[in-house]
């Protein structure tokens, strides 16, 4: 199986830590009410990781709202 491009040994690719950090920044940006366009990353891989984090947190919020609505409708 071929490794993911950004985890290969190429020095021009971001490290796993950089990607995790970009995801975390994306999640926090969503929680702070910022648009996905707030993305501060210029490198494509890190920009994509930011968007993944932002989208992940948005999905969590949608899930939380659905659970809350289902619970409130049972009352």
Image (cartoon, helix red, strand yellow):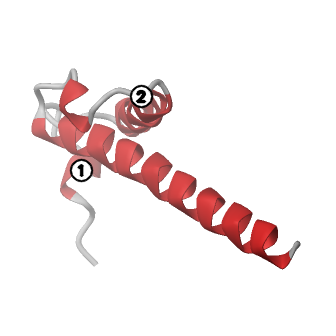
Q: Is residue 62 above or below residue 10?
A: below
What residue is shown at x 64% (from left), y 58% (from top)? 64
Find residue 60 and report its horizontal and vertical position in percent: 55, 55
- Which residue is nearer to you in this view: 13 or 54? 54
Residue 48 picture quarter: top left
Q: Is residue 72 above or below residue 21?
A: below
What residue is shown at x 23% (from left), y 48% (from top)? 6
Find residue 75 and report its horizontal and vertical position in percent: 88, 72
What residue is shown at x 25% (from left), y 60% (from top)? 4
Quadrant where the image shows the N terminus: bottom left
- Which residue is nearer to you in this view: 68 or 59? 68
Residue 33 is marked as 2
Point out the frontmost of discs 2 and 1: 2
Find residue 61 and report its horizontal and vertical position in percent: 55, 52
Report the side of 9 relative to 25 (left or right). Answer: left
- Which residue is nearer to you in this view: 20 or 10? 20
Label 1 neighbourhood size at 10 Å, few (<14), some (14-19), many (20+)? few
Question: What distance separates the C-alpha of mark 2 from that of mark 1?
Answer: 34 Å
What residue is shown at x 28% (from left), y 44% (from top)? 51
Q: Is residue 60 above or below residue 63?
A: above
SS at mark 1 in the image: loop
Note whether residue 39 is visible: no
Report the side of 64 relative to 30 (left or right). Answer: right
Report the side of 28 relative to 54 (left or right). Answer: right
Q: Which residue is mark 1?
A: 8
- Determine the residue located farthest toward the right in the rendered image: 75
Residue 40 picture quarter: top left
Residue 17 picture quarter: top left
């Amino acid at each position: 199986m071929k490794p993911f491009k950004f985890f290969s040994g190429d020095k021009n690719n971001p490290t796993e830590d950089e990607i995790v950090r970009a995801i975390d920044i994306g999640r926090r940006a969503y929680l702070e009410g910022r648009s996905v366009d707030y993305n501060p990353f210029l490198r494509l891989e890190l920009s994509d990781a930011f968007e993944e984090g932002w989208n992940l947190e948005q999905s969590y919020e949608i899930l939380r709202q659905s659970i809350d609505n289902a619970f409130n409708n049972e009352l």
